[in-house]
Image (cartoon, rainbow, N blue to C red):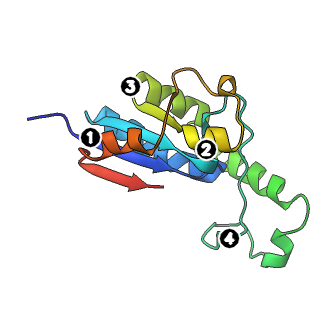
Amino acid sequence: MSEKKMAIIATKGTLDWAYPPLILASTAAALGYQVQIFWTFYGLQVLKKDLDLQVTSLGNPGMPMPMPMPVLLQALPGMQSMMTGMMKKKLKEKGVASIEELRELCQEAEVKMVACQMTVDLFEFDKSAFIDGVEFGGAATFFDFAGEADICLYI
């Protein structure tokens, strides 16, 4: 029996959306899957050495907040910083690994991290801004792996 494969496309670059691909990838790798994450568009923020990931409740009505907050208030200056601080505090209180820790765990488990070359070029990112071990490739690189994957996820 051949090794199972899981392919993930990660497109989001916020603190809350950085967790799902990293948690799923590290778990799958621990279960013996060969895993590749194709990071594209805003998802590339998660691969940067210097992280400044934020979370916002705008456009995310499912985000649990300590008190009901009208959308208009969520748009006020400083609210995104407040929401990010609240989320970081909650993650720490609950003992959830940081994004940095999850990235390292994925790399140790040989999860292949592929940064979308087209997006790197589009936004004129400097490749040296990304963590070590990141590979760069286009959609064809993703399809080579995903075409044989047992599980394919879009996050």
Foreground label between 2 and 4: 2
x, y (%) of residue 155? Answer: 48, 55
Q: Which residue is at 72% across, 30% downward?
A: 50
**Viewer-proximal residue among 42 and 33:** 42
Q: Which residue is mark 4?
A: 59
Disc 1 residue type?
Lys
Q: Quadrant of the N terminus?
A: top left
Query: Dot 4, crowdedness within 10 Å: few (<14), some or many (≥20)?
Result: few
Q: CA distance from mark 2 to mark 4?
A: 24 Å
Q: Nearer the viewer, mark 4 or mark 1?
A: 1
Task: Name the disc covering residue 119, or none.
Answer: 2
How far is disc 3 from disc 4 in space, using C-alphas? 34 Å
**Reading the chain from its start, which is encountered first: label 3 or label 2?**
3
Q: Rate crowding at label 2 as few (under 14), some (14 to 19) or many (20 or more) other CA atoms within 10 Å.
A: some
Q: Mark 1 or 2, which is nearer the eye?
A: 2
Q: Amino acid at mark 3?
A: Glu
Question: Which residue position is annotated with label 3?
Answer: 110
Report the residue marked by disc 1.
Answer: 5
Q: State whether residue 90 is above or below residue 62.
A: above
Answer with mark 1 or mark 3, whichever residue precedes in sequence: 1
Closer to us: mark 3 or mark 2? 2
Left or right of 95 in this view: 113: left
Measure how far apart labels 1 and 3 are at the Cα level.
Answer: 12 Å
Q: Secondary structure at mark 2?
A: helix
Q: Earlier in the sequence, mark 1 or mark 2?
A: 1
Write the residue at 57% across / 42% down.
118
Mark 2 and mark 4 lie on one chain; the one further toward the N terminus is 4
